[in-house]
Amino acid sequence: MNKIVWSIVGITLLITLGLEFTFLSDYDSHWWNSIPAFYALYGFLCCVAIIYFGKFLAKNIVNRDIHYYD
Amino acid sequence: MIEFLTIPGVILIVGAFLLPFLPEKMRSSVFLLFPLASLYVVFTTADGYSFSMDFLSYQLQVMEVDRLSRVFGIIFSITAFVAGVYAHHIKDLGQQISALVYAGGALGVTFAGDLLTLIIFWELMAVSSVWLIWARRTKESDGAGMRYLIYHALGGGILLSGIIWHYADTGSLAVESISQNYTISNVLMLIGVCINAAVIPLHTWLADAYPKATITGAVFMSAFTTKSAVYVLIRVFPGWELLTWFGAAMAIYGVVYAVICKDIREILAYHIISQVGFMVCGIGIGTEMALNGATAHAYSHILYKSLLFMGTGAVLYATGTSKLVNLGGLFKKMPYTFGLYMVGALSISGIPLFNGFISKSMTISAAGYAHNETAQLMLLLASVGTFLSVGLKLPWFTWFDREENDIEVKKLPVNMYIAMSIAAFACIFYGLFPNTLYAYLPFESDYHPFTIYHFVETLQISAMTLAGFWLLKKKLAGELIIALDVDWFFRKAAPTTRLVLVTWVDNFYDRVEDGILSITGFLTEKFKNPMLWLNPFTDRRNKSDGYSPAMDVAMSFIMLTFIVISILYFL
């Protein structure tokens, strides 16, 4: 499983980064288009942020025992 | 009259009345005819068709067809059919009837040309769908159903008061767009509709009730209530700026909870809130492209969300549990369900060549074209969370992870597979041929989803979300917890509220009643024979109706004379 996952990630990144640097190199409609691999970075950072934020929220505020309301 | 019976909503409701008279074996199959008939009517009725009826002193536009109502009518009919196939093995007449009335209500709202017709079908949806929760017949579903009903009664009441106020102000009952103006009547209507659209913080009924509904009921519920509210928002409140931010916020709010939650159907329920956020955000932006995006997203969403609810429902049916902590390692036992679920999961994550891609990218791009980059980035953040929770976390901890899990798996009825396959086919079909959907959108569209930019954008985000999940997946593993939401405030306040508003009031009335009764008793006792206390020198206990025989005779004689004289007089 490990290998499959990392090869999916690797191949997708390779293709999309290739496309980005060839076809979209002069594309400019948002401020972030000038940052190379912005969407990859954004995706990764958001993913980590949501997991840690969710975990923080769960641990400190919202998680309760399953019978909390009974 | 015949025309009245061809209104799509009415067809389904009439179906609900006919169903009990049919033999049990035929009911599930006949059920499917009504959504098909409604689909036929929706397709064959021309734009601009309207049908009006007199009701009291009003002329009601019971049905009005245009491009916007048609596209919603199509998808509501299709879903009612697909969900009907999924529920084909169910023998519970109550569920079948409430599902038909519920779908009929949603279709009625869609084609309602005036606000009075709309509110009638609107309330009908609330009171019929609650039975799909109660039909689960557990203690949890009883409570959740009651909270759901109270919430919707409140929402319907607020909407109705808004409508009445609106009518008093403008003299018009037409369902038409209102320009952004926060008057009391508009705000009341907006709040009423937002409750059904599960706009935060008015969303808790959804996350509370949907996971506790029956397996098949949840499939119906995932499609109708929120999306008919989205329809009304598109129709009545396009371009209301506040909706942009509420929409973007609920898109993120929903996915954060979907990451926290540990029950597969609760994950999906929270995720509806997130997806409706995309639509609400598009409605707030209000450009033609954004409204098209919101409509297309509602259409796609209904298809893949019902597929996802069918997939998780199948897991619940087969294993008897929907808690992640008990699931895992089901891949070898339920491979087809996994495959069909993943079609829905990839669709909802907006992966290219699935139908989520053609509508989600449209909504997000619309935010970009409207130069609302903050909203655009918020929606992109929400799509990361979508893929993370519904596309990775849920399937990983359900079908993989704990290979040693020896949970027993019941065989699924064939109709469940058929229903899931129809929905999965539709997801892929629209993903490959987006123009088949774009042709039905309310505005002309020259949007092209298959551009290199969109591919790069979506695939980079998704690939790195996968990487992030893979590195941190242990943090998301199942536990036996519930996650509190803002309904904590009123659920915790419920005992005190009940004490103050019910128990104390009851007690007060009890006391007053007791008091009045004892006063009455006292007075009756005393006035039975006032001589006893008016004349303290006697101890004769007179009976109030007891006279001496001589007195009786005298009185009877007077009475007789009186009768004889009156008879003589009248003759």
Image: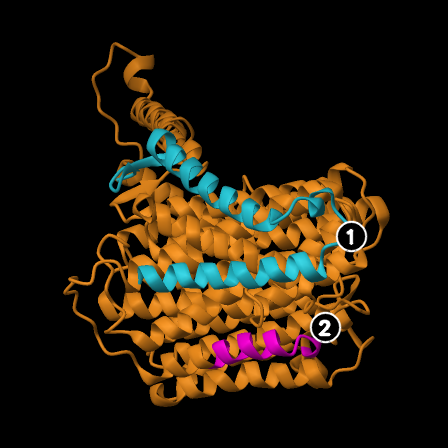
Q: Mark 1 falls on what kind of element?
A: helix
Colour-to-chain, orange: B
Colour-to-chain, cyan: A
Residue B443 lies, in percent from the top left, at 80, 67
Q: Earlier in the sequence, mark 2 or mark 1?
A: 1
Is residue B123 at least partly visible in the picture? no
Main secondary structure along the magenta-highlighted residues: helix
Residue B393 lies, in percent from the top left, at 37, 54
Describe residue B70's horizontal placement relative to residue B75 as left or right. Answer: right
Residue B121 lies, in percent from the top left, at 61, 63
Which residue is tagged 1? B369
The CA distance from mark 2 to mark 1 is 18 Å
Residue B111 position by quadrant: bottom right
Identify the image quadrant of the C terminus of chain B: bottom right
Same subunit: marks 2 and 1: yes
Residue B527 inside the magenta-drawn segment: no
Label 1 is placed on what type of residue? Tyr
Describe residue B280's horizontal placement relative to residue B484 as left or right. Answer: right
Q: Which chain is indicated by disc 1?
A: B
Number of residues whose C-alpha sits closer than 10 Å to that of mark 1, classed few (under 14), some (14–19) or many (20 or more): some
Q: Which residues are magenta?
A: B422-436
Q: Mark 2 falls on what kind of element?
A: helix
Describe residue A4's horizontal placement relative to residue B108 as left or right. Answer: left
Label 2 is placed on what type of residue? Tyr
Which residue lies at the image location 51% right of the left edge and 57% below the top edge? B462
Residue B550 position by quadrant: top left
Which residue is tagged 2? B438
Number of the front mark, 2 or 1: 1
